[in-house]
Image (cartoon, rainbow, N blue to C red):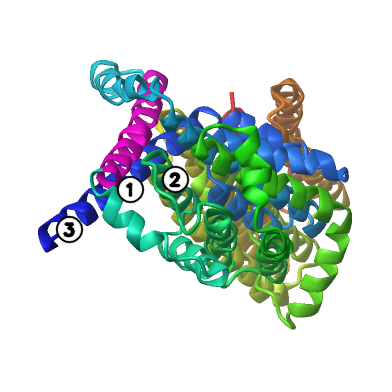
Amino acid sequence: MNLQDILFFIVKLIAGTGVFLVGVHLLTENIEQLATNKIKELFGKTAGKKLVNVGIGALTTALIQSSGVTTVLIVGFVNIGIITLSQATAMIMGANIGTTITAQIAALSAFPITTYIQVLAGLGILTTMMCRKEKTRQVGFILAGLGLIFVGLSIMSDSMKANRDTIQLIFENVTNPFLLFFLGIALTALVQSSSAITSVIIAMSVAGLRIGTGGNEMLFIILGTNIGSCVTALMSSFGAATNARRASMIHLMFNTFGSAIFMVILLAFPGFMRATFGRWFASPATQIAMFHTFFNLICTVIFLPLSEGFVMISQKIIPEAKTEEAFTYLDERMLLTPALAIEQLKKETVVLGDCAMDAFDTAYRAFCRKDKSAAAQVREKIDKAQEKSNQIMAYVIKTSAVAGESAEKEVSIVHNNVADIMRIAEIADNFVKYTERLCDNQLSLSETAATGTNEMVDTIHKLFQFTKELILTGDLSLLPHIDSIEDKIDNYRKNLIDGHIERVNTGVCTPAISSVYINMVSNLERLGDHITYVAHSFE
């Protein structure tokens, strides 16, 4: 094997790995987009039952075929407080089971039928070129991705077959289990994909190659890849809240403890592979894939009852931070799944609404008390709302960049809703000015006028609560009730202004208060309109 042969082998191996990873990316990204509703449903079923959470982690990973994506999402959900560390622990265990499906797909390359599956690469791309419907194009990309996975595996296997004797001489001398174990960790950490490393090993087995004596050696690399796969989650937890870092630590502990147990078993039982999977399955590729699945299943069975212990250890290793950043639903990990990112945007919009209404309530109470000193507090709350609005808009831009056409409408709705909610903050600022005019001109509202406006504000709060519920639940049956409340607010405006004019004519109220009172009531009616616009945006 001369230098040219070596270079040719390396180029083909890298090319095959690249094609494989492109195929996995196409498959993962487009299945994820088609299955976004299912993913939302799965994560929406988080419960106290450990087996349910294991199932959620496994099914989500099976759907999007990436434990890295699932684990990053889990870390994100812990970071924003949607799930607890105990729930996350069980989900991570499930994600490790679900990720083995990629190795099972790769193991199919040992069978002749996979040659025909490669045709899907061409058929899938043709489908995307000829069709305009987004879902049909996504199906095309899924087919293309599946085909490319087997094209990549075929390229890797062929490059190894062409140089089988030389490669075998190199690898049959690599028998040190710890060297193989750390090789698995290092390679997986480097490419951030345990699937890629596992698939290269499977491609080697398809080419008829073996590592060491052909016994447990390949399994030591597989154990290493499980620890190396934790790198993605660990990186995603940098700068996150304490519990998110703990979730990443639990992921690392689960794979490390599991690998340590199996290292002892494999070292104590050198004939493990031949006596078990080597006897049960004829294809070496299937043997490796089945071991990968078996490893994660057994580790879950062992560690699931001890999940609370994992939580306690993580809390000892990573103590509670003295100061935590302000809470936000806008975790960038959610951008991996646009549908989930949009759900987070809706929740953050509700938080923005609370900030704007808090500014309004403070301004209104100050108006009722004729308290000019509250102006600074109100404007501080308005600034807080504006800052949150800016954060939402930045996240909207990022979500829009990764969202498909079907999600673009929802992103646009959030964009418009932010504008309507910020009108509430502007109305709060108007009330600061009304307070200043009352104080500067020594004006006062009559008791009747004050009672009427208080009732109108109470009605606005009811409208806001129903709108929040609609945003969070998507329950459009609330719209008729919202419209009914909004009509009541409109009637309040008419009745309050008519009543004020009558009081001015009878001398109960002074004409000087009219400009303040009429503008104030009109602003309250506008506030109700903006809240109603938000509710109707989801029709």
Between circles 2 and 3, the one closer to the viewer is 3
Q: Quadrant of the C terminus?
A: top right
Residue in view at x 73 percent, y 77 percent: 318
Report helix, strand or loop for mark 3: loop
- Hey, what amino acid is under mark 3? Met
Whether tag 2 and tag 1 are in contact, CB under 8 A, the answer is: yes
535 displayed left or right of 112: right
Residue at the limit of the structure toward the bottom, as seen here: 322
* Residue 239: x %, y % from top left: 57, 72
Question: To which quarter of the image does residue 417 belong?
Answer: top right
Report helix, strand or loop for mark 2: helix
- Comparing 431 with 409, the one in front is 409
Q: Is residue 144 magenta?
A: yes
Around disc 1, counting alpha carbons within 10 Å, would you say few (fewer than 14), some (14 to 19), or many (20 or more)? many
Position of residue 26 relative to residue 241, above or below, is above
**Can you identify the residue that label 1 sits on?**
17
Position of residue 469 relative to residue 315, above or below, is above
- Comparing 23 with 292, the one in front is 292
Around disc 2, counting alpha carbons within 10 Å, would you say few (fewer than 14), some (14 to 19), or many (20 or more)? many
**Can you identify the residue that label 3 sits on?**
1
Q: CA distance from mark 3 to mark 1?
A: 22 Å
Magenta stretch bounds: 134-161
- Hey, what amino acid is under mark 1? Thr
Res. 313 visible in picture: yes
- Hey, what amino acid is under mark 2? Ser
**Can you identify the residue that label 2 sits on?**
199
